[in-house]
Image (cartoon, grey):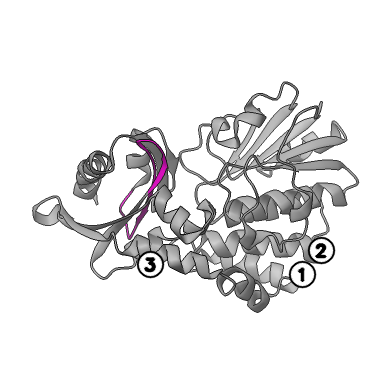
Amino acid sequence: MNRFDAAVAELKKGRKYLVVSHVSPEGDAVGSLLGMTLALRSLGLTATAYLEDPVPDLFKFLPGADTVVHSLDGAGPFDATFAVDCGQKERLGKGFVALKNPGRIINIDHHATNDAFGDVNVIVPDASAAGELVYDFCVAAGVKIDRDIAVNLYVAIHTDTGSFRYSSSTAEAFEKAGALVRLGADPWEISRRVYENYPAKKYKLLGMVLSTLEVAEVGSGSAKASVALINVTREMFRKAGAEKDLADGFVNYARAIEGVAVGVLLREAGDFEYKVSLRAKGEIDVAEVAQAFGGGGHRNAAGFMTKGSLEAVKARVIEALKGTLSKA
């Protein structure tokens, strides 16, 4: 029995489908969303791609990106909804949560913290990216993967593995990426578009963010480790003339520092409200920290929203990390 049998069976029950992913979408969300949407359309089905937030400029080159809708007013009814790369229904956005007729929800995800909100749940924490699971779904459903689908799924896998630098870069991830290259994805062109196409304002913003760097020693004895913290404020975005998605990936600068075990980015989202991103090395499980704050993610990459002053949030994060570091 294939883990996708129940999901594939949903394709035989209707003609009209919705595909959704999480708010503040990144490469895996956008690539998986578009890959799934194009796959359904290739089977002669009607498929609508929905994101509550805009497609980041960085990913607007992806095939199908110009067809994504950002409102569901008057939409539906749908025979079923495919939710990709999202651990909690609320993270799909207020527009989707308010939708009265989404049909059965097929939840395809790789977050260990996924709460199985779907009617059909395919949750594989060992998968490198949701894009890898969409690839598996396509194979199970008999989809002929063309160049456009291949490009989207390659971007999903490539970005969520940190260009195959993270521990999630399994043999299966490389094998599927290789298959997608054979099907038309161009690694060099994709890398150029994703990593060598940043606007100058991103670097203006990065300069301000890196100036906030703090490295704290957390824990004691064998559990002692270095944690690097950086933050980005709304005023920094204003001064740089930058959109919020241009801060995506900044947390990796904190994580990459020699001797640092965990990198933390605190992004001001509102008055006394912060989006906290955590990136860890090795066996350190930051997903459990994020869960304690109502968020989620993966062992080495997680996040959450929280309220308080910047200093208060920093203190709470450092305190929470002490327990996690003592287990590593």
Looking at the rendered structure, the kind of residue marked 2 is Asp
- Mark drawn on residue 23: none
Residue 42: x, y in percent? 86, 52
Query: Given the current orientation, which residue lies at the most extreme left position?
Result: 221
Q: Position of residue 304 (x, y in %)?
A: 41, 40
Residue at the disc numbered 3: 207
Q: Closer to the camera: disc 3 or disc 2?
A: 3
The residue where tag 1 is placed is 183
Residue nearest the viewer, comparing 98 with 185: 98
Which range is magenta?
Answer: 267-285
Identify the residue at image location x=53%, y=38%.
87
Q: Residue drawn at (55%, 30%), measured in percent from left and top?
A: 90
C-alpha separation, residue under disc 3 versus residue under disc 1: 39 Å
Where does label 2 land, which residue?
146
Residue 304 placement, left or right of 229: right
Q: Is residue 17 part of the magenta span, yes or no?
A: no
Residue 280 drawn in magenta: yes
Q: Would you say 180 lies left or right of 110 here?
A: right
Task: Describe the element under mark 3 as helix, strand or loop.
Answer: helix
N-terminal-most mark, 2 or 1: 2
Q: Secondary structure at mark 2?
A: loop
Asked if one can make out residue 80 in the rendered structure from this viewpoint, the answer is yes
* Type of amino acid at the residue the image marks with label 1: Leu
Q: CA distance from mark 2 to mark 1?
A: 6 Å
Q: Quadrant of the N terminus?
A: top right
Residue 314 falls in which quadrant of the image? top left
Q: Please, what secondary structure does the residue beneath circle 1 have?
A: loop
Q: Position of residue 328 (x, y in %)?
A: 24, 52
